[in-house]
Amino acid sequence: MKLQFLLLLFHVIVMSSEVVDVPDDVDIYDWMEDYFDELDKDSEIEHRRLGPDAEDTIPPNTSDKSANLFFSSITKLISKNSEEDIDNLGAYSTDSTKILLCEEQKSVNFAGFRIFVRLLHHFFKDIQILKSGFRPHDYETSFEINHTAVSYENKAFNLRWKGEAEFDTTKKVFYYTKFSLLGDCAGIPANLPEHPTQPVESYISRLKKTFSTEILQTNPRPRSVDYDRFVDDFLFKKVRVQLCERNGKILSGAEFSKYLSDRYQTAVSFTDHAFSQDTFSNYQTVVIISVQANFPNGVIMRDNYTFRVEEKRNRGDELGWVDWWTAYVIVQCPINLTPSVDPEALKDEFIGQVCGSLSPIINDGPSVESRTPFLSHMMKEEQQGFWAIICGTGNGPKNYNYFTEQFLPSWPSSYASSELEKSEVLDNTNFSFKCILKLKKVDTTIAKMDFQMRAYYEVNQWLVKEVRVGCEY
């Protein structure tokens, strides 16, 4: 009678694995909570939520330890691809263990199972709502595990695993006799694709929406985990984030998350969002997100973020999932839009930003990225009349195109490193200043060079219109 009762208790309504496109306007994690609440209403098996790091499961000498070992191992295999966890399952499986996948229609050996779970590891980016149920017994057990996994295409998969184990009276542990993945595996690729399966426009749409509505918002104010999640979901793991206001300093993704948290922790509101995008190269798309951030005491700042999107593997090995990622972020210097700003009060900060951004052009190597902070302070429009006089190129002034496309890219080639020795104001009325660089040449000799500049105040910011690049001395 007791056995019949237990068998009745373990009656399971088997459902096909379901693939769901989660709408963009629905939080996927809230959706998964509701989804499993509905599953529980239809299931007669007793479920209980367990963490993925179930402890004291080895050796699996009881039925609950056997079930929990499988539960924790399969979860960590998908999320971390841990060799230790696949070995744990292998240690308590035998040559006669039946391993069935995809509606129990595909039979594989343990080596095939190892390959399949590694594919799942690369295919899914997150696992949520972990639950399990099992039928306890002294000499045999059955168990079922379900969870929702989210792919890099933002699709939610309901995965259900079912297993059986028997107690070995000689070795005093449970060995798995069968485990299987229920459902037809629809939507799970047989092999990792060579190129992203989602259009780049889909990624860009999610990037713009998430950054503008979940990061640049105050109600509710984002938590640290929200900034981290944005970085994990959209930025390549080796992303380079360049900060203009810190003289072109390069940050990691984790440091960028903290920067966003610190910068906007006192923001009152965000308004006037603007978006644009353009082709940067034959494999990169540039997405520019601009917003007006309002702070206490009437301070208003215009912030501009440039996201450079390209096709990348999310992990370093040859089996990494290929998708669209932001590989480079440029955070432009904020534009102060606060009314009644005294231009005189901005001069010292402006000189520090301009002079401080010269040395990185040499130290970080010649590239568009290393020159961007310095050039962000220049007048770029033809009608603004920018000109530069450069030692060694004749006495005539050069236009902006010559200065940015010919002089600056070639200038660092003679130098190994640079540091700003000092900056000084030359004329406060007709605002001009000088940056003195100390240069270490390739032959290790030391030289100095002066950059003299004149700036004009336009649209709430100072911009350089005239540059004189002196000779070495």
Image (cartoon, rainbow, N blue to C red):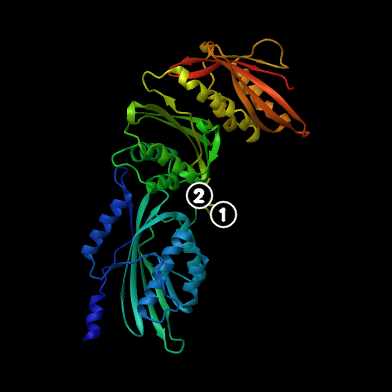
Closer-to-camera residue (259/162): 259
Q: Judge whether 157 appears above or below 336 on screen.
A: below
Residue sitting at the far bottom: 170
Give the crowd class for mark 1: few <14, some 14-19, many >=20 residues within 10 Å.
few
Q: Which residue is mark 1?
A: 317
Expressed as whole percent of the image width and height from the top left, the position of residue 129 reads 33, 59
Closer-to-camera residue (282/220): 220
Expressed as whole percent of the image width and height from the top left, the position of residue 410 reads 68, 26
Q: Name the mark on residue 418.
A: none
Question: Count of labels shown?
Answer: 2
Q: Amino acid at mark 1?
A: Asp
Residue 364 found in image quarter: top right
Q: Amino acid at mark 2?
A: Asn
Residue at (39% x, 82% y) in the render? 166
Expressed as whole percent of the image width and height from the top left, the position of residue 440 reads 72, 32
Q: Name the mark on residue 314.
A: 2
Q: Secondary structure at mark 2?
A: loop
Residue at (52% x, 12% y) in the render? 384
Real-space Cα distance between discs 1 and 2?
Answer: 9 Å
Q: Judge whether 369 appears above or below 177 on screen.
A: above
